[in-house]
Amino acid sequence: MSAGVPWDAARAQEIISAHLGLEGPALPILHAVKKEFGYVPEAAVPLIADALNVSRAEMHGVVTFYHEFNREPHGRHVLKICRAEACQSLGAEKLARDFLAQLKIEWGQTTPDGALTVEPIYCLGLCAHSPSALYDDEPMGWVDAERLNEIAAEAQNK
């Protein structure tokens, strides 16, 4: 789901050029770069900054402000577990902590087989269905340990 093609500066430049005519092109460029490569490589930041005539620091600030612009490749699947208050009140922190320990990874890391990246997210708007998660952009509520284990198994098999 998340894997893109290998980094190619020439392809990145094509993407940037294709979006320069848009109003406020920074975010469309970043989304397109992420879609192409599966992440926003560090090498893309100066290319985008130069094209938009902003400093590298400004572009770095944009990339790091938005959690959606991961700076390292993700696993084949991405699970985001909600850490907002409603989910916390229904045990999401312990659920996530136990799941991460079971996978032997930390927040933001990918399983050694490259199958699953687990990231935190802060409110999916599914508070009435807490704890909630997002698996490959598919929202799910009332997540429990059994469901997380099913997701991990599914991720390994796809």
Image (cartoon, grey):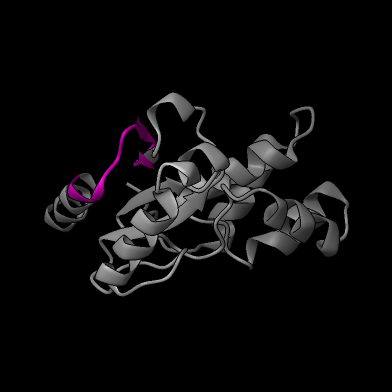
Please tell me which residue is depicted at 41% across the width and 42% down the height of the picture: 90
Does residue 29 show up?
yes
Residue at 42%, 63% in the rendered image: 6
Task: Using the image, determine if residue 107 lies above or below residue 83.
Answer: below
Horizontal relation, residue 115 to residue 27: left or right: left
Q: Where is residue 107 in the image (x, y as percent from the top left)?
A: 46, 64
**Foreground: 24 or 152?**
152
Residue 110 lies left or right of residue 21; in this view the side is: left
Nearest the eye: 114 or 26: 114
Residue 65 falls within the magenta-colored stretch? no
Quadrant of the image occupied by residue 112: bottom left
The location of residue 39, given as percent across then percent down, is 51, 56
Q: Farthest front residue?
A: 89
Residue in the image at 50% along x and 33% along y: 124
Residue 38 appears anywhere in the view: no
Give the farthest residue toward the top: 128
Give the extent of the magenta segment.
Answer: 134-146
Q: Going 58% across and 54% down the picture, which residue do you hit?
A: 12
On the image, which quarter does residue 32 sit in? top right
- Counting from the top left corner in percent of width and height, residue 135 is at 33, 42
Up/down of 130 relative to 145, above or below:
above
Please state the horizontal and vertical placement of residue 134, each as a whole percent of the image: 39, 39
